[in-house]
Image (tube, rainbow, N blue to C red):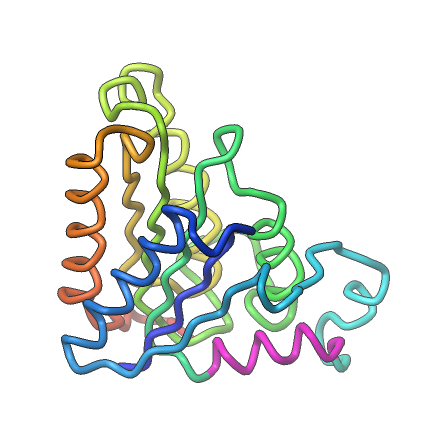
Amino acid sequence: MHVLTVLDHPDPASFSASVAQQFINGARAAGHSVELADLHAEGFDPRWSMADIEGEGDAIPSADVAKEQQRIARADAICLVFPLFWWGMPSMTKGWVDRVWSWGWAYDQLDDPDQSLQRPRSGVLLIPAGARSDEMDDAGYRSALETAWIKGTFGYFGFSPRRLELLCGSTGSSKRRKALLEKSYQIGLDLAPPQWSEGAG
């Protein structure tokens, strides 16, 4: 498979960057080809604009959106890596999702999150989070994110199978952080192939 990893963190020395690299290392060790989209390093503009609306459907998208869509077209699997930010996506990831996975290219309906204009791709979200896993579960945050992202957003984009992995305790001890990096490597190594279902793509 060809695996695209999308990284959102302004600091190249961040824990998120290390997670992305370990996932890539695992995918490469499994024999997959790999590609990294480092949104901050590449200067992606996350601002949704009138030009994006005019580029929906059959219209020609802006050059930066077209570049990202071409990356996606090459990919059989996509991994998004970003820190949990106010219980959601940081603005760069949100803008990348809003602008790149556009109406008429990624989807054209809203009644079934398992239908997409895109072919199925294996999808993984690796999300470093400072909170402990029990805190996330007890407060209902994990369930809320699963509903919003796994049952919702990334189904419209053809992610099948799709997996949310909260890397809880990412600001903890060096032992904990090492274990999370090893887990990221293993997820890349064991990455599942896309699953085709009736009506997909």
The N terminus, quarter of image: bottom left
Residue 7: percent from left, percent from top: 46, 59
Nearer to me, 147 or 9: 9
201 in relation to 178, above or below: below
Say if the magenta span includes residue 141: no
Q: Where's residue 99, x and y in %?
A: 67, 61
Q: Is residue 69 above or below residue 100?
A: below
Residue 149 horizontal side relative to residue 192, left or right: right
165 lies left or right of 112? left
**Which image quarter: residue 141?**
top left
Quadrant placement of the C terminus: bottom left
- Outermost right residue: 50
Give the residue drawn at x 60%, y 59%.
Answer: 96
Reply above or below: 30 against 89. below
Q: Main secondary structure of the magenta part?
A: helix
Magenta segment: does it hold 64? yes
User: How many dots with numbers?
Assistant: 0
Between residue 59 and residue 182, name the one nearer to us: 182
Which of these two is toward me, 86 or 177? Answer: 177
Residue 95, x across and y down, in percent? 64, 53
Q: Nearer the viewer, residue 173 or 28?
A: 173
Q: Residue at x 22, y 30 (%)?
A: 173
Q: In the image, which residues are magenta?
A: 61-73
**Quadrant of the rendered image containing residue 184:** bottom left
Give how far across and how far down residue 20 sits, in percent.
Answer: 35, 59
82 relative to 100 in the view: left or right:
left
What residue do we see at 28% from left, 33% from top? Answer: 168
- The residue located at (43%, 52%) in the rendering is 13
